[in-house]
Amino acid sequence: MSSQAPAREDLTNTPAEAITTDTNYSHLPTPPAPSLNRYCLVSVGATAPFTPLVSAAFDPAFLTALIEAGYTRLVVQAGSDAAQFRDIALRFAHPSLKIDCFDFVDELRAVMVLCRGDGGVSRDTGVGICHAGTGTVLDAMSLNIPLIVIPNPALQDNHQLELAEELQNQGYALHGSADTLPQSLKAHECQKHTSSAFNPANPVPIAPASERHEAPTIWDIAHTISEQDGRLGNVSGARALSTMGELEREDLERLVEG
């Protein structure tokens, strides 16, 4: 049975404690706590494990990059690796950074939205870091979340690489890798401040509930990477991705990718 993700209130009100004495984390920087919360969500999706990405999220080098960039919360959706890393998250303590880790959640969008700023009231704009799965990517794009996509090379034909490259080419996301996650975060921070074309303010319109049937579909983004090889054929009339749950979206994605 899947564990439940922390309640939204839990993701904003859990107090930080003294820095951990764990050997791996004892030398993390301790700058003054930021005045606004800032969230980083790392998501591996609902189907295939992506242990290298989860491991990279807990690496001291990445945590250092987060702290130095002013992040206050790291939320890791770790899938089947959650049991291994949850205890680390529970033991981790730092004056300005908190870590939450869970396996799956029925509605990941409710966690994703925390990566959006609220106009400087209590939360600054954060970042979503996810596997390059079409369902997860479209959810993040529909919420206008700054995005770093990490292809999972263990999947068949490394098909996520095509999507990650196309997203970066079109300016919707930064294409990163699990091996260089701290560098990917730093590149994202630099792009955020220097390029108005990167992460467009409204890359995908957020349709009201009454218009969900017109929301972006899996084909909108898959079409771009399949035009040249014709893998998808005629897919008109596809069901709106926004009407599906996370597991259903991932199942559809696997069918599309063959």
Image: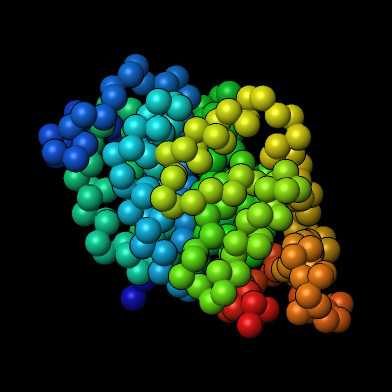
Compared across the picture, whether 143 is left or right of 58 comes to right
Question: Is residue 215 at all visible to an observer of this figure?
Answer: yes
Residue 222 x/y as whole percent: 74, 67
Looking at the picture, the colour scheme in use is rainbow
Which quarter of the rendered picture does the C terminus lie within? bottom right
Q: Quadrant of the N terminus?
A: bottom left
Establish if 156 lies above or below 99: below
Residue 74: x and y in percent read 40, 42
Q: Nearer the viewer, residue 237 or 119?
A: 237
Across and down, in percent, residue 67 comes to 38, 29
Picture coordinates of residue 17 (x, y %)?
22, 31
* Residue at x-position 58% and y-position 23%: 120
Q: Residue furthest top?
A: 32
Q: Is residue 60 above or below residue 177?
A: above
Q: For residue 224, what is the image quadrant? A: bottom right
Q: Can you say whether 83 is above or below 72 in the image?
A: below
Relative to 223, is 173 on the left or the right?
left
Please tell me which residue is depicted at 82% across the width and 69% down the height of the picture: 227
Instruction: Count all numbered tags in the image, as a single digit.
Output: 0
The residue positioned 52% from the left and 55% from the top of the image is: 150
Quadrant assignment, res 35: top left
The residue located at (59%, 38%) in the rendering is 116
In the rendered image, is residue 118 in sight?
no
